[in-house]
Image: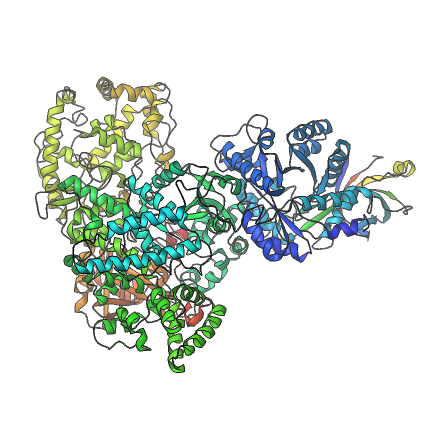
Amino acid sequence: MGFNGVSWAADFVHLHVASAYSLRYGVASPAALVARAAQHGMRALALTDRDGLYGAVKHAVACAEAGISTILGADLALVGPAGDPAGRVLNSAAPARLRSEDAARVTLLASGRRGWASLCRLVSAAHQAGPRGAPVITPGLVAEYAEGLIILLGPGSDVGRAIAARRPDHAAAALARWREHGEVVIEITDHRTRGSTHRAARMLRLAREAGVTAVLTNAVRYLDPPDAAVAQVLDAARQLAPLSERHLARRNARAYLASGDDMAAIAARVCGVPEDSTMTQLLHATAVLAERCTLDPQRDLGLGGRFMPETTGGAPLVTLRMRCAEGLRRRYPGGIRARGQRRVRRRAAQRLDHELSIIAKTGLASYFLTVADVASLIRSRGIRCSIRGSGAGCLVNYLIGISNIDPLDYDLIMERFLSESRKGLPDIDLDVESARRIEAYRAIVDAYSDQRVACVSMMETYRARSAIRDVAASLGLPPHEIDAVAKAFPHIRAGRIRNALTELPELRTSGLAMPQLTAVFQLAERLDGLPRHVAMHPCGVVLSDTSLLDRTPVERSFEGLPLSQFDKDDVETAGMIKLDVLGVRMQSAMAYTLTEIDRTRGEQVDIDTVGCADEPTFEMIRSARTLGCFQIESPGQRELVAKLLPRTMGDLIVDISLFRPGPVNSDMVTPYLETRHGRQEPSYPHEDLAATLSETGGVVIFHEQVLRIIHAMTGCGLSEAERIRRMLSDDRSRASAGEWFREAARDRGYNAATVVDVWEVLESFGGFGFCKAHAAAFAVPTYQSAWLKRHYPAAFYAGVLTHDPGMYPKRVIVGDARLAGIPILPVDVNASAGDWCVERVPQLPGEGLRPGLREVKGISEAEVARIVAGQPYTSLRDLWERAAVSRPVAERLVLVGALDSLYDPDEPDAGAGEPDAGAGEPGAGAAEPGVAGESSVARKSDVVNELGVTERSRGAEKPGVAGEFGVAEKPGVAGRPPSRRDLLARVGVLDRRTRPSRPGPGPSSRLFTHSVPANPHKRDTKAHHPREEWEAGAPAAGGPAAGEGRAVAGEPAAGEGDARAGGPAGRGGLVGGMVAGGSQALLDLDADRDGFAELVPAGELRELTPAERVETELEILGIDLSRHVVSFYEDLLAQLGVVRSADLHRCRAGSRILVAGVKIATQTPAIRSGMRIIFATLDDATGPVDLAFFESVQPRCAARVFGSWLLVVRGRVRRTGGSVSVNGEECWDLAALEEIRAASGIGAVRAAMAAGDVPAQGGPAQGGRLSRPVPEAGEKIIYPNGFVLSPYAETGSPGPGLKGPPRKLWHASPGSSGGLDAGIGNSD
Amino acid sequence: MSRTYAEPVDVGVQDGRPTRFVWRGRLYTVLGVLDHWVISREWWKQQNPDLDTPAEREFWRIEASPGRSAGAVRGPSAEVSPGRRARAGTYELRHDLATGQWILARVWDLTG
């Protein structure tokens, strides 16, 4: 072998390679890089991602598959001399990752098992050392983990930078320092940027002079030169700056995965003369280092191993046996009772033996013990915890307390969960209360220590919207345009952007296919699937032994929990036990319901022991009044339960299993319902299968049935049957499974026709079936939630509204409660808690619902806490001072009537204590609540709670305005309570007087402006002024007078501007003095000095009309609390002859009718034919109206259906079973029609509807009629067994999300909102 | 000290390197390459950029003297004989890889 460059070129190995797991830096996936390296004939490839080892396992797996060796490392940022990564002073508000952008970097390579452990621990330590998301190292830190690590110092290192700065002395010194800390190798890289070859040559000289090995790399970021454009976009996205020469002056397209020959050419260039010995040495050293750093996936990385937590006390299997025996006695207390009991226990004991034998064979005893321990840990903290998934079929889980479902009750089998044929660990999934999920994780970490526990991470990847955003920003598009373009797309893959533009009707008419955006879309598609953000997986927790941190790098999650850099597949590959602990909102909602029941009635309901055969509960389910219930609240499910008419838990299990795309579309539902309701005799392919199939009328619904059929026909045993079942889901393996099955079944004596029949059934339904154990686990909370709704409706609604577990916006749940006769009380600063509460009211059924303060948009947790702590309040001023709420929040509280009870007209002295009311009258200040006021405060508040509130809520339900003016008609100002407008003005006065030198935007009420915030559900949680912030402020520097002028002159608040309103300067001292009670004098003094309209007498300004009230409620709470929105359109609906939900059942099938309402849901689910059908549900105040829009009408309807909030739809009545729905044919914007009616009368509305030229309110005239023919939407995705799917199924809707409230409810002005954004909506 | 031009030139290339060029009717012989680098073109400023080919510009900073070449082309670290260097100037050539066009970009005129 000659020591020449040519032969070493063949041995070249890339040692510095970034994959896409270098977030917003690398472009290629590990697998693609490995495939290319293999194609180049390289025998190994390194992956050295920036800041982490996120791709390490995927890289190792890809290398093993490609038959090349694995090398792993990490590229980490160095802390600068001043402790800051970049060594320079930067705004501390800048994102951490931005601050580390300029840091010097070194690459660490792992050698051997020890090296891998060091690498993992160093990466973890780097994340610990830096701010979250911006890991940093120091030479000292590297020294701590130096064993088995090789420090690669390239052009980006401190050494390389000194060379670039022509300071060879500094470079030599830095190099010498590094050599004290570990094994050092100089990395030579030349991307042929300006001067880079010279720098590389100087690096090489430094290495030679210092006697340090030098190796050659290409610092790879992508596969091929054309990918450089994507890398440049990522650079811009990472640096939050548009593309410009300034950022990219030294970039070109040379960081690709070059061939060995290309690398030899680079070596020749750097070394000066081809074929010289320096070059040979360089390439030789590279190959040698690669050899040294080759890792063995099993031996060094531990892939494929199994690392269980150490258990205490004896052999795990013995302990498990013992605990199962104990469980058997507890769960089946046999004894002298009925013989049936004993038989059940005997059956359970037999089953237990069987299960334990499998557990013994698979060696998983300690796994079960660990999960049982975790479940009891969680429950011991009072957190609701239930099993989900196939684990419910395992008796052992029931006996040792992991599960509360007896598998024998529902005839569940264990093999679906754990069988000898199954490789890897089974999944036991636990559901816990979502609101306490992090608490549950902490409990596990506390018990097992962070040496053995980590949460599992997941990569959020670029999809259409995010890719468009980043690309468009890097190309310098204005933010509002970026927003509009991105939101125009549904939640689809980035790779489908241009297809979607031509295929989706609502995008075809959007005008987005303009040439200026071509490059944006083209590049955005190339970001498809690239990781962009590390997040905590919603449920994965890894448990391992104390070697965990040698095998996975760990960083901190947002919540401060240890987070493995491996995702859920990686941790399994790496042999760690993964436990799924999933937060389920319904569990939180039910827990809250139970505490509300306890609080208001003193009843302790144990929902887990209420049984499962309550007839009133099932009766409610059968009538489809299931809004808010787990699993069965969607429009489709309400239709299905109404047809299926469940009477038992078993029926619910079937219902849940049937309501899935597969069964629904492969027509399993109809034959099941036919036999269930006795319209058809069940038929079985063979009588031997009758026992298995009778429970579902001959239809295969459950996986468990598939297993039993296979076993019955072949006698193979359930474990083997499970293996065969898993083969059914894949085309290739299904064929071989079929061959095996036919042969085995014929051997057992079944005739050929039967065998073919049965296999056909298995083939077509097997893949779609549902795990019955999983359905059973789901059915429990389904039943429990329905039971709570039936028996404790008010508490149930409070739970559902507080934890928002379902698919509907909260206003729909409120509407459901209203229909159920539960009074909806207003928000009240004296009566509302943070969350929704049940409140006694003196009317049937005696319980009302009081919204929580958290519903108020923009309110902070601190404000909620202060308001609740300070209750009751006597006046606005009292609230302002003691609860110290920010001005926007105070205004919102006023607008939603949260202070109305303080000024109740029925209360003689209401409002008398209000200082502002009498601010102009001398002596009025004497009524200022002092110590003397306390007793009257309490009394008044009591009255308000018992009486005032209900009085008012009843008044609010009157549609007219008489009540409002009744007050105003009283002569004189004295006895009149202040209107909400009066109070709003007083907030302004208070703000100017008491919080003077506020430099930011002044009046922030937007009641009558058009900049309605986009989405009340997206709380601007940052938009508050925490008390701490004020008090941290400088002492009243500006003084009241100075501040006042500014506040008054303040520009009208721009949108959500109050978040940024003003720094802390000058607020502290004054507020402090105020709270101390010494402020009255100040206020009076101010009033005297004040020359203009600062006095706000009560009743001077008109009260809000009922319509305005609802508008502000929707804007601030997102809920039409006082009245249903649709009630304002009653006249129009009546004149048009719109059929209401309550009357829908009287319509004949096929008749053409008009329906209307607020859109509460849109879905585009998977449909058998591959069509995209838009399902929408409207709420018209009498109930829901379900709609379907087929592809033929989508060109004229889709944009409107997705874009409008209030709709009128014409369509044909469709009746199926007991339910009625409407196939939409045309639709209009209800608000726009009302506008026409108001202006020109009902005739004009009819004319406009006939002409089809009604724009969406406030938006451009888009949609409308299109006469051109519609091409089929998209390439269909064809599944085995003929199931065809639209590529846009399940992608959600573009434009406003389900919860998106309107921009405007009533016409405000023609508005200027033309262009793209108006039609496209507001929520993401 | 240097002057900026943007004049098209004819360039003779050997093994990927410029060996001589004709500027304003005069033949220059490349004595040595001082530096050579590549920069991405600013594709993001174009209306319809071709994103499938890397739009690159190659820069060559060379020493050259009027007249015929006498010796072999040398690499960046190679020495140039003192006699030639006396008459040599430094030139920067820009090569647009997409169009194939060569431009004389800058000249460091030692006599000027």
Image coordinates for residue A1186, horizontal then vertical, percent: 26, 63
* Displayed quadrant of residue A1256: bottom left
Q: Is residue A1206 visible?
A: no
Q: Determine whether A1230 is above or below A170 in the image.
A: below
Image side of residue A333 versus residue A229, left or right: left
Q: Is residue A882 left or right of residue A240?
A: left
List x then y, in percent, for residue A824: 17, 46
In the image, residue A1063 lies at what x, y percent? 39, 27
Number of numbered labels in the structure image: 0
Write down the quadrant of residue A441 in the picture: top left
Quadrant assignment, res A563: top left
Tell which of A96 and B108 is nearer to you: A96
Give the residue displayed 36% in from the left and 26% down from the top: A1029
In percent of the image, x 41 and y 38: which residue is there? A448
Q: Is residue A552 above or below residue A1002?
A: below
Residue A752: x and y in percent read 41, 82
